[in-house]
Each structure stands twice: as structure tokens, then as C-alpha cells.
Amino acid sequence: MTTYLVTLPGVIHTSPAADDLSRLTDLLAEHDPRGKQFTAQDEEDLLIRWLPGSDHWALTLLVDASSEAEAREHAKQVAISALLDEGYTKLSATINEDEAIARAQN
């Protein structure tokens, strides 16, 4: 198994609440294989980054997988699960999986 850093871009089609970043980060941090707890103060470690002034975001997640494709798929499933847990639907939030990037970490 290799640890991959996967970045998934997405869009929230409804106006996100002010504390969405915090709640989604907490939900996603549970899936980090290294057990790291992310906080808003850890700017470079944030799991979710919002594009200022828009509804676009990018999720970054560490995933243990045997291939790049498996890492992207696992990250997508984690993101979908967190979004659904937060009350979003496929109509109110989308992940642009065709633009996903997975890089092996050494």
C-alpha cells in the first residue's frame, strides 16, 4: 500500500453556512490514515479550501491505496459520505472527479 495525497475539486450549489468548513473538516479528518487532526490554524494542512467569493472548493485527503485510481475512488467515496452526512445531496454539492489529482507520498 502507498499513501496518496488526493485533491478533489467540487462545487456547493447552495450557499454554504459559515461553519460548513469546520464541520466538513472534522468529518473528513476521521479518515486521514495518519490520524492527524486538522484545524483552521493549520493553513497548509486544511482538508477543504474555498475559492474566495465563490462556491468552488478543493478537498485534499491522504489515502492508503494500491494504485492511483483506487486512491481517487476512495477519496471520492469519503468526500461523498462527508457531504451526505452534512446534509448535502448530489444536487446541492458535486465533486469534479475527472479533475482529481493523486500523488504518491514518500
Image (cartoon, rainbow, N blue to C red):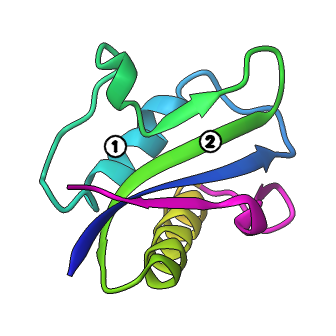
In the picture provided, is 42 more to the left or to the right than 23? left
In percent of width and height, residue 4 lies at 35, 63
Q: What numbered label is drawn on residue 58? A: 2
Q: Nearer the viewer, mark 1 or mark 2?
A: 2
In the picture provided, is 22 more to the left or to the right than 16? left
Label 2, secondary structure: give it. strand
Who is closer to the viewer here, 37 or 72?
72
Give residue 32's quadrant in the image.
bottom left
Give residue 53's quadrant in the image.
top right
In percent of width and height, residue 40 lies at 36, 19
Label 1, secondary structure: give it. helix
Would you say residue 93 sits in the magenta stretch? yes
**Amino acid, disc 2:** Ala
In percent of width and height, residue 105 lies at 27, 56
Position of the N terminus by quadrant: bottom left
Residue range (magenta): 87-106
- Residue at 47%, 47% in the rendered image: 60
Q: What numbered label is drawn on residue 26? A: 1
Q: Badge 1 local density, few (<14 within 10 Å), some, or many (20+)?
A: some
Position of the C terminus by quadrant: bottom left
**Amino acid, disc 1:** Asp
**Spatial CA span between label 1 and label 2:** 15 Å
